[in-house]
Image: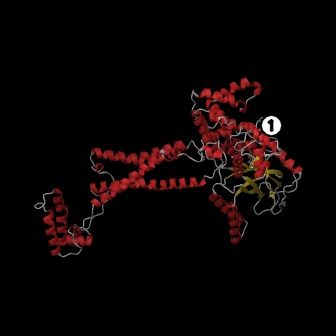
């Protein structure tokens, strides 16, 4: 064993190693995240967004964003590391290796006469009889005398030249990197050492693991509580009207933790009086409905009123405490809505299908929350007010201006987007009464809005036609274009207090039966991840078809170029059950913009399972332009998706009709309501 001095010297090195091992990679990860976040901030530059302060933080906000508890702890640990490094360097200087020639000021291999001459010279300087300084006496005894003896004694010099030490070969030493007071093994120090070993090596890891497991067991992968997912799963229904989605959404366990203060009652009653018409109350029995409303869980009442205050744009009059609660509600909303949508499209039926109607309702609620548009503005059957909902997300546009625009040969919001810039500016300034600066802001937002196109196909790999029980491969290219040339961007949402990324949901559904056959989320922010997924998917598809390496590489290269130009590949598989003709619809729904959703029709024929080698043929039929097909597609969509404020009714199911094989791909068609 090494002596206590050497053991104690190892302790700072041990502490430095234990701190540096996790600290260095964690610091690098924090720095990489900080730089990557800055690269993603591509936001709207209109005056309303710029004035919101959401993207351009003040100096105080920047300082508060940097000076956090985690960052302060990180700085403190680095200070400790620097102190330990400095201490170890000083300690290494003090504990020099014994070098007799260097001590006597001689070169290695010096003669005996030179050694004696150097010894006499140093004796005059450091001998106790010549120098009364205690330090000089110590240096003479411990270094000079020892060095002289090691070089003049034949045995000691021979040992030094062979083994590097005057005493000969040194044994292997093992030490403990602990302070010296713990290595004096008396009754007290041995108990302290035992407690340190048990505490650091056993109890501390067990406590950390218990705390982590206790906290993580309550949350799912998206950092949403398991209780929330269970509640959403139980409350989700196939006929859930979009107006009822909010009633399910506010029952999240995270919202039950919103503080309930007695001082908030008066302000909440004022909010209730303002947003009462937006609540899902029966106006014929308004008194009973109001009593019933206030008997709900206080947290649910508070969250619902705060959300409606945000949707109706009355949140600016809230006191600071309620404004902070509203920010917390809105901050949690995107991930909760994403999980709620997953619960809607989760396979529930015997055929493994999800539900379309509540899925569309969740997306519409997300659009309203991000753009701060009332749910009543999207209620079907309200004429110009329903068509005005997409206009309300534009800056400086209210219901009056939107109605004025719709009365001037502009039938839909898409017609307004398709106008030339100068025509749109003239309409806003000369007819709607907007200023030229307001028209410029509207133009910037219109340029930010995405235009989506879909290219969809369904097929069985290596086979012709589709038979019952087949695994069908769904493939869709989702292409995004903006007038300003951007691909990845943050939506214009000045009243939503946090940066929000656009997400798109691709749903393949049978509108007549309210069934979702396939669903997948698409994002245009992370191009590197999209390139990786697309390359792997195209390569696997080509290899399964037996393509040559050159053809595979060419297909992968073309797909990567397509991704870089603003397209995303959506691929997946699903199993078809029963034979028959299916009029499917592929939706691409945006969770952040109103009026940017698209849909395209897809006709599929599933034949009865026959003997091997006698499969039916596949006929690709492009989508017709006749009004009959348009009306049929619109009827299917409207039957499966009632008004946002309609009652819950079970959707009507229709049996698939037998007919000729028609598996098709067709261009996208926009839907003004979604």
Q: Is residue 540 visible?
A: no
Q: Secondary structure at mark 1?
A: loop
Instruction: Classify residue 550 by image quadrant.
Output: bottom right
* Front position in the image: 18 or 279: 279
Quarter of the rendering occupied by the N terminus: bottom left
Quarter of the rendering occupied by the C terminus: top right
246 with respect to 191 (left or right): right
Position in image of residue 183 (x %, y %): 29, 51
Position in image of residue 592 (x %, y %): 69, 46
Position in image of residue 64 (x %, y %): 50, 44
Label 1, on which residue? 382
Q: Callout 1: few (<14), some (14-19), or many (20+) C-alpha neighbours within 10 Å?
A: few
Position in image of residue 527 (x %, y %): 64, 58
Above or below 170: residue 526: above
Identify which residue is drawn at 83% across, 54% down.
Answer: 603
Identify which residue is drawn at 38% across, 53% down.
Answer: 15
Instruction: Classify residue 318 by image quadrant.
Output: top right
Q: Is residue 501 visible?
A: yes
594 with respect to 62 (left or right): right
612 with respect to 491 (left or right): right
Identify which residue is drawn at 16% across, 65% down.
Answer: 145
């Amino acid at each position: 064993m090494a002596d206590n001095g050497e053991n104690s010297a190892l302790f700072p090195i041990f502490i430095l190693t234990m701190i540096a091992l996790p600290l260095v990679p964690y610091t690098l990860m924090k720095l990489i995240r900080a730089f990557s976040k800055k690269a993603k901030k591509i936001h709207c530059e209109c005056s309303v967004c710029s004035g919101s302060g959401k993207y351009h933080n003040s100096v105080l906000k920047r300082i508060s964003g940097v000076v956090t508890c985690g960052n302060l702890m990180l700085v403190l640990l680095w200070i400790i590391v620097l102190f330990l490094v400095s201490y170890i360097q000083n300690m290494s200087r003090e504990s020099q290796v014994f070098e007799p020639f260097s001590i006597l000021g001689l070169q290695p291999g010096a003669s005996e006469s030179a050694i004696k001459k150097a010894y006499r010279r140093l004796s005059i300087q450091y001998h106790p009889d010549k120098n009364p300084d205690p330090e000089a006496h110590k240096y003479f005894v411990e270094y000079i005398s020892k060095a002289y003896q090691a070089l003049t004694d034949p045995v000691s010099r021979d040992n030094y030249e062979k083994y590097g030490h005057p005493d000969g070969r040194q044994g292997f030493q093992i030490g403990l990197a602990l302070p010296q007071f713990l290595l004096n093994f008396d009754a007290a120090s041995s108990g302290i050492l035992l407690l340190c070993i048990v505490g650091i090596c056993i109890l501390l890891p067990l406590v950390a693991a218990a705390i982590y497991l206790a906290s993580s067991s309550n949350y799912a992968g998206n950092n949403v509580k398991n209780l929330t997912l269970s509640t959403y799963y139980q409350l989700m229904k196939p006929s859930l009207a979009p107006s009822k989605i909010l009633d399910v959404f506010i029952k999240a366990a995270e919202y039950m933790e919103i503080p309930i203060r007695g001082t908030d009652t008066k302000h909440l009653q004022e909010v209730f009086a303002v947003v009462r018409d937006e609540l899902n109350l029966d106006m014929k029995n308004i008194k009973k409905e109001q009593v019933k409303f206030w008997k709900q869980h206080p947290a649910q009442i508070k969250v619902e009123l705060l959300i409606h205050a945000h949707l109706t744009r009355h949140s600016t009059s809230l006191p600071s405490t309620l404004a902070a609660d509203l920010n917390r509600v809105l901050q949690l909303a995107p991930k909760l809505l994403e999980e709620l949508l997953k619960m809607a499209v989760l396979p529930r039926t015997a055929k493994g299908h999800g539900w379309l109607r509540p899925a569309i309702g969740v997306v519409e609620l997300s659009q309203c929350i991000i753009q701060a548009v009332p749910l009543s503005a999207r209620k079907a059957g309200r004429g110009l007010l329903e068509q005005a909902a997409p206009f309300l997300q534009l800056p400086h546009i209210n219901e009056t201006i939107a109605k004025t625009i719709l009365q001037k040969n502009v039938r839909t919001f898409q017609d307004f987007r398709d106008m030339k810039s100068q025509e749109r500016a003239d309409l806003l300034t000369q007819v709607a009464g907007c200023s030229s600066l307001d028209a410029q802001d509207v133009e910037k937002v219109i340029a930010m809005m995405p235009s989506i196109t879909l290219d969809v196909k369904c097929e069985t790999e290596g086979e012709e036609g589709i038979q019952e029980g087949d695994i069908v491969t769904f493939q869709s290219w989702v292409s995004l274009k903006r007038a300003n040339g951007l691909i990845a961007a943050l939506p214009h949402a000045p009243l939503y207090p946090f940066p929000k990324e656009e997400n798109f949901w691709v749903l393949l559904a049978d509108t007549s039966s309210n069934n979702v056959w396939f669903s997948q989320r698409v994002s245009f922010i992370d191009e590197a991840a999209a390139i990786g997924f697309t390359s792997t998917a195209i390569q696997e598809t080509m290899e399964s078809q037996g393509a040559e390496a050159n053809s595979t590489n060419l297909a992968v290269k073309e797909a990567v170029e397509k991704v870089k130009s603003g397209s995303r590949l959506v691929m997946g598989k699903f199993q078809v059950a029963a034979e028959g003709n299916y009029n499917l619809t592929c939706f691409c729904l945006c969770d952040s913009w109103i009026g940017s959703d698209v849909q395209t029709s897809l006709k599929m024929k599933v034949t009865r399972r026959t003997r091997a080698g006698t499969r039916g043929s596949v006929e690709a039929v492009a989508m017709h332009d006749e009004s009959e097909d348009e009306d049929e597609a619109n009827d299917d969509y409207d039957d499966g998706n009632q008004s946002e404020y309609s009652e819950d009714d079970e959707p009507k199911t229709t049996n698939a009709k037998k007919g000729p094989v028609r598996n098709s791909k067709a261009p996208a068609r926009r839907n003004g309501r979604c």
